[in-house]
Amino acid sequence: MKPRVVVLSGAGISAESGLKTFRADDGLWEEHKVEDVATPEAFARDPKLVLRFYNQRRRQVMAAEPNAAHRALSELEQDFQVNVVTQNIDDLHERGGSTSVVHLHGEILQMRSVLDDATLFSTQGEDIVLGDLAQDGGQLRPHVVWFGEAVPELEAAAEIVAQADVLLIVGTSLAVYPAASLMHFAPPHAKRYLVDPNAEALAVDGVEVFAEAASTGVPKLVQRLRQRRLP
Ligand code: NAD
């Protein structure tokens, strides 16, 4: 049985693929306040703005390519069981070759009716506009989890983290709950690593820190894990 590596990834792993994180210095996400574009209240108030914002995000994701960090994680599968639990709504882990990816906050390439959060449809990469209806008559919206909404995959993700022999946290400010609480489900024996250029500021006890960009830090760590085949 191969040891299990669980990866908790956030916006930072996709930054070098050209997708902006949302906690950059200006506190804005792509020129918008988060509460204006990523809450159910924002969608009720100005659905056109919210749909346009996510249409832009979808186009950017489709134009982006996985970087060395995404690809290194898929190489890890040769020696380890690897589960990725990501806060990202992009599909760069999958395109980088990872075969087990849980999207805590949804997927921008999927959509659903406002009346039914369980049935998902592919957007086929197309924009969603006001008036696009699902078969149940509800307005279509992107399949993303907004602030204030439940995180349906949380329990499944916690169960995965609880089986980790190695926990690798990469590119997340650990500021968005409940996603940030997931690391605490790792068993005591699990070796913990954090790759983030801002890692020192995140100051997490018992975690070995690689204070550098994902595209260099993750391949370095992956190489180390593969050489030892042990945490
Ligand atoms: P965040 O913006 O709060 O934090 C990003 C972290 O990435 C920071 O700690 C930063 O220091 C780090 N970082 C920046 N550049 C990096 C690099 N090159 N390599 C490694 N780390 C780097 O992001 P979060 O914690 O993921 O929370 C953001 C929320 O926004 C999530 O809920 C997510 O759904 C959403 N989001 C997703 C995407 C995406 O899908 N690509 C992009 C932006 C925001």
Image (cartoon, grey):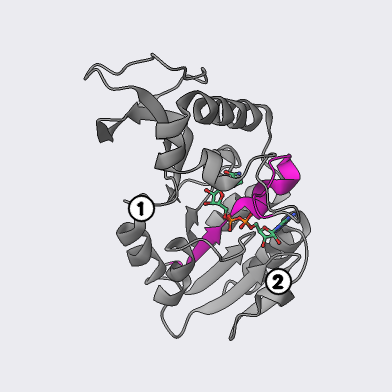
Residue under the image location 66 percent in, 63 percent down? 222
113 up-or-down from 143: above or below: above
Q: Amino acid at mark 1?
A: Val
The answer to whether 15 is drawn above or below residue 173 in the figure is above
**In the picture provided, is 20 more to the left or to the right than 230?**
right
| Kind of residue at disc 2 | Ala
Residue 18 colored in magenta in the image: yes
Which percent across, then down, holds residue 6? Answer: 49, 64
Residue 19 in which image quadrant: top right
Establish if 142 lies above or below 75.
above
In the image, 50 versus 124, the foreground residue is 50
Near-viewer residue (203 or 62): 203
Of all residues, the one furthest to the front in this rendering is: 45
Locate the N terminus by quadrant: bottom left
Please state if 105 lies on the left or on the right of 225 as rendered: left
Question: Disc 2, ligand 1: is the CB inside 8 Å?
Answer: yes
- Circle 2 SS class: helix
The residue shown at (50%, 26%) is: 51
Residue under label 1: 151
